[in-house]
Image (cartoon, helix red, strand yellow):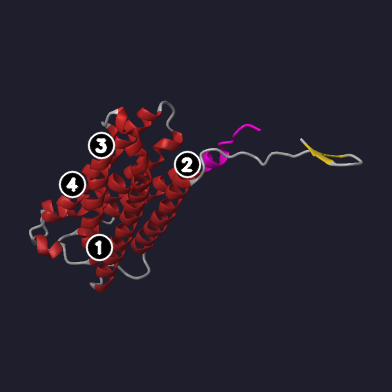
Amino acid sequence: MAANGEPTFSLLLFARLSASLVAILVLTWALYFTTSFLPQTLSQQDLIYSVLHPLLMVIGFILVSGEAILVHRWLPGSRKKKKWVHLWLQGVALGCGIFGIWTKFQGTEGVVANFYSLHSWMGLLCISLFGAQWLMGFLSFWHRGEVRMSRMRVLPWHVFLGLYTYGLAVITAETGLLEKLTFLQTKGVVLKRCSEAMVVNGLGLWLAMLCGLVILTAVSPKHYQSIPTTKVAYTDSKCLTS
């Protein structure tokens, strides 16, 4: 029977729906509940940097890099074309991630005030791994054909590190959401049961769902085939299969 791509299509559909919901939730949180991002300095510039950070790290870094992982599953055309689009999207994600971390260096409170927690150190580690991974992919993409065997040996590690870094990015975002919400609730800015807390908690849940869907789609078999039917014919002396 011919290969059936419906399971892969379903995974892609659910992943896209989850990504859309994540984007809506982070936009709602950052743009509608702006008072939660007000810095102590009450500077308009610091407010813009505070709002840009979650938008760049979630939409620009996590969602775009997730889409880059899925390129090989939905984009038609040659393998070289898929690799080029994958590399380009990952480059956009890396740029957004670097810019997102850069916004935390711009606050008037200083660098040390923004890089003291598990979330901040995981973010630096994640961006460093992502940058090294992208550079390795860039150099591999422009290599000549005679190093094809070397690229085949490196490919499993490239895939593993790519999925690991993507998962690490989602975990880092989760720690950031927890850190921010806990800080706001401790200061009494946000109640434990309110619409903003529901938005932030929902964002965390859908990020976890999206991470699972992206990784499952990436590692699932590309083609699904039904189990072939074996016909059995019995005779007086032996059993024949066809």
* 223 left or right of 111 in image: right
Quarter of the image that includes the N terminus: top right
Whole-angstrom CA distance, mark 4 to mark 2, is 28 Å
Residue interval drawn in magenta: 1-10
**N-terminal label among 2 and 1:** 2
Whole-angstrom CA distance, mark 2 to mark 1, is 29 Å
Q: Mark 1 sits on what residue?
A: 119
From the viewer's side, name the closer residue of 68 and 18. Answer: 68
Q: Give the SS element for disc 3.
A: helix
| Residue 189 visible from this viewpoint | no
Q: Mark 2 sits on what residue?
A: 12
Residue type pointed to by label 2:
Leu
| Residue 181 visible from this viewpoint | yes
Q: Is residue 7 magenta?
A: yes
**Mark 1 crowd level (few <14, some 14–19, many ≥20, 10 Å Cα):** many
**N-terminal label among 4 and 2:** 2
Q: Give the SS element for disc 2.
A: helix
- Please tell me the numbered disc located at residue 138: 3
The residue at 25%/42% (across/down) is 136
Asked if the residue under mark 4 is in contact with the one under mark 3, i.e. CB atoms within 8 Å, the reply is: no
**N-terminal label among 3 and 4:** 4
Residue type pointed to by label 1:
His
Whole-angstrom CA distance, mark 4 to mark 1, is 17 Å
* 98 left or right of 141 in image: left
* 138 left or right of 5 in image: left
Q: Is residue 231 magenta?
A: no
